[in-house]
Image (spheres, rainbow, N blue to C red):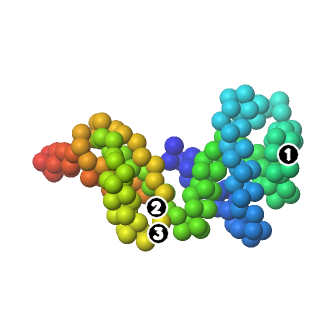
């Protein structure tokens, strides 16, 4: 998965740069969301990767799907993605585009995993901690993972703060086996 993310990053950055230059971040966001949904559909993937169909045929179908959302820059972007056989990367491109857009707005996305459900006060305390660490607004998603045993694991971009019992046990085990 990491390799796909790495390959998708330049596409997301190029789309973001174009969207920002043309002051059309919302339009690009919407178009990429539609394309991401299409790229998750098994029939669409089969069609797009079938050698019987040219990139221009797949392009025409996607542009029809986008309808009024497809301006010339978006159309050119889709053509480049298809010419380079990167159709299946569109969900990752859209995801990375949204991260860039959030960063532009001064919002950092974080994921918090907890061994138990967090109440509102605990969640606000963790958000405050993360916000002070990155000096930005924090937008969080939260999930419960009982395998953590206790504590939380927080992910902000590539940074992971593991304050879980499972993480501490793994660190202890690693230090003892050296």
Distance between the alpha carbons at the discs numbered 2 and 3: 6 Å
Q: Which residue is mark 2?
A: 138
Q: Secondary structure at mark 2?
A: strand
Q: Is the residue 51 above or below the residue 72 in the image? A: above
Q: Secondary structure at mark 3?
A: loop
- N-terminal-most mark, 1 or 3: 1
Where is residue 82 drawn, in percent x and y?
76, 45
Q: Which residue is mark 3?
A: 136
Rendered residue at 83%/51% (across/down)? 70
Rendered residue at 56%/50% (across/down)? 5
Q: Secondary structure at mark 1?
A: helix
Find residue 37 and report its image quarter: top right
Where is residue 90 drawn, in percent x and y?
67, 46
Q: Is the residue 107 above or below the residue 61 in the image? A: below
Q: Nearer the viewer, residue 121 or 107?
A: 121
Give the number of the mark in front: 1 or 2.
Answer: 2
Q: Nearer the viewer, residue 73 or 134?
A: 134
Q: Which residue is mark 1?
A: 67
- Left or right side of 37 for 132: left
- N-terminal-most mark, 1 or 2: 1
Distance between the alpha carbons at the discs numbered 1 and 3: 36 Å
The answer to whether the residues at label 2 and label 3 have Cβ atoms under 8 Å apart is yes
Q: Which mark is residue 31?
A: none
Q: Nearer the viewer, residue 62 or 120?
A: 120
Is residue 86 shown to the viewer in this render?
no
């Amino acid at each position: 998965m990491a390799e796909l993310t790495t390959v998708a990053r330049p596409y997301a950055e190029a789309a973001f740069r174009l969207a920002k230059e043309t002051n059309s971040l919302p339009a690009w966001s919407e178009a990429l969301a539609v394309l991401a949904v299409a790229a998750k559909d098994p029939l669409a993937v089969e069609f797009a990767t079938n050698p019987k169909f040219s990139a221009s045929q797949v392009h025409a179908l996607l542009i029809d799907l986008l309808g009024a959302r497809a301006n010339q820059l978006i159309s050119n972007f889709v053509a480049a993605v298809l010419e380079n056989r990167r159709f299946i990367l569109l969900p990752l491109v859209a995801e990375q585009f949204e991260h860039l857009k959030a960063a532009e707005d001064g919002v950092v996305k974080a994921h918090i995993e907890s061994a138990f459900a967090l109440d509102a006060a605990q969640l606000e305390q963790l958000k405050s901690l993360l916000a002070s660490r990155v000096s930005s607004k924090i937008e969080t998603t939260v999930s419960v993972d009982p395998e953590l045993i206790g504590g939380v694991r927080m992910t902000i971009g590539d940074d992971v703060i593991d304050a879980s019992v499972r993480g501490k046990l793994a660190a202890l085990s690693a230090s003892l086996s050296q």
